[in-house]
Amino acid sequence: MKKTFNVDSPSFTPSFLSATENVNANGKKSTGISPKAANAAPFLPKSAAVSRADTSTPDWPVDVQEFIPQSYSSSHMANGSEGSAYDHFQTSSSHIPAQSSLNSQPPLYQDALSMGGAGFFPSQSGFQQPAQYHQYAPVGPHNQNLQGYQRNVHDLFIPNDFREEIQKKAAATLQTIPNLHLPAHVESYHSLVPLDTNQKSSTILGGYSSWIYKAQSSTNGKFFALRRIEGFRLTNEKAIRTVQNWKTLINSSVVGIHDAFTTRNFNDSSLLFVCDYYPMAKTLAEYHLGQSKLLRSRNNPEQVSEVVLWAYMTQIASALKAIHSRGLAARVISPSKILLTGKNRIRLNACAILDVVHYDAQVAVPHLQRQDLVNFGLLILSLGSNTPDASQNFAKAMDQFKRHYGKELQAAVVWLYSAMQNQEKTIDQFLSNISTQMVTAFDGALQLDDQLNSEFGREVENARLFRLMAKLGFINERPEYEHDRQWSENGERYYLKLFRDYIFHQVDAQENPVVDLGHVLSCLNKLDAGSDERLTLVSRDNQSCFVVSYRELKKGMESAFQELSKNARRSH
């Protein structure tokens, strides 16, 4: 039997008008939703539909293809216009973030809708979960798997020993000694402080007495080391021009040279070399062969480990490679002229001095380069055998050296010492022989680089939070602004004052102050991110209570700070 049309059936209503009531043919009001659709399971994305089980049985077949929106825009909600400039959904389920990573929240934020999407994420082709910038995310290698209760506040900052070392170097850089009988300035350098108080005539530097001073440049304000060669008279202007070749040499294992000039500010004729300054640096002679080492037991002398000697050897070989490739020679490779600037970190020093002092000698450069290799081998032998000058008795020093070190290191020292007997030996050949150790040193340098990046990454948060503290300090409890003594107590500035109390002035049930750095960091990070999380602010007299979000606090802080900044720029 043919069915007749039922006028009581609900009329079709489009989805965007589903919330409005419609009038059917009989004049009755209808919501536009069929009974079957009302009992249907709610729409879920694929990733969420798998994790949530639906116990209700649908009235239609379950093999219906799931609906996936292709485009969406907040303008459709406002005026139904077409041509959305921003897609909040992706056709591929691979772009939907995992629910566990989003704390089981749907990947659609109301603020993204209200701001039109395209302005909120201008560089995205589809919706992406915004990063939680208020959460601290350390970077770099992690060698310890610690639980939350095993960590403390020091994990957010660089280690104390590293910080202490940096602070000591900064203090040494700024250290001054008053009432010194030194010139007030030498050329463009002033505030001279002696770094070496032992006046000795050095046979290495041509028999001249050498002094080292720390000085500050009046040109750029940086600190430099001035090496003074006392009593030197320059007889040929071409001699001092040889320093130009060293000024362009840049190597991590060579102390940089910036300038050289003669002066009479010390009441004599002196030659000064301007070099890089490394605070708290020691020479290898002071660290391994100095007076401090004499305090150890003479029956059981402390030996330099083989790992440290290989570290020194790879760095000096790298420095000689850079020097020899420019047609130069170091000429000064001695424990008293090599600086130890960090843990197993050395730099060749005073390299250009003999080029100026012994300019008239005119020795062939290949001969000087082979002599560098010999001095290189004697340096390692002196450190390993614990003798200041191994060249005086090479056989005895070598016998002692063989007792503590392996065959490979012994062969390297012998190869270097015999460089004068074979004119074909070069630093390139030596680098090929110790290529295994060079790879090990390179890997250690990369690991140190990763560690330093990880340590300094912790300090990134400090700079960001400091800017927030500075802005709050400019605004909170300002005595007067534009002849208004109540400016900081009105409007959003009053919220910021209560927020300051909420962060720093909380008390417990016994009225004891709460000193919780974790609470401070959490609140400031949420303020910086403009989180939608709400908090309750109570006035000091407990008569007023406000419920505001971090987003509103941030908006008020930026507005007040911009107002102050605008008038500050106008006054200048």
Image (tube, rainbow, N blue to C red):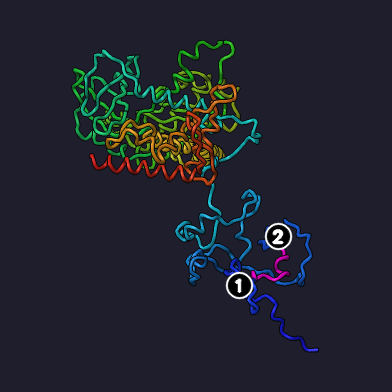
| Type of amino acid at the residue the image marks with label 2 | Ala
On the rendered structure, is 285 left or right of 64? left
Q: Which residues are magenta?
A: 30-41
Where is residue 14? Give x, y as percent.
60, 73
Where is residue 484? Give x, y as percent.
30, 35
Quadrant (top left, top right, bottom left, bottom right) of the C terminus: top left
Q: From what the image shows, is residue 448 above or below residue 531? A: above
Residue 489: in magenta span: no
Name which residue lies at 70% across and 69% down.
37
Give the numbered dot on residue 49.
Answer: 2
| Distance CA(mark 1)–CA(mark 2) | 32 Å
Residue on which disc 1 sits:
22
Count residues near mark 2 (Cα–Cα under 10 Å), then give few for <14, some for 14-19, many for 20+. Answer: few
Report whether residue 340 is seen.
yes
Q: Earlier in the sequence, mark 1 or mark 2?
A: 1
Q: Residue furthest front?
A: 27
On the rendered structure, is 139 left or right of 572? right
The reply to whether callout 1 and callout 2 are in contact (CB within 8 Å) is no
| Type of amino acid at the residue the image marks with label 1 | Asn
Name which residue lies at 65% across and 78% down.
26
Residue closer to the observer: 136 or 544: 544
Report whether residue 254 is seen.
no
Where is residue 381? Give x, y as percent.
50, 25
Count residues near mark 1 (Cα–Cα under 10 Å), then give few for <14, some for 14-19, many for 20+. Answer: some
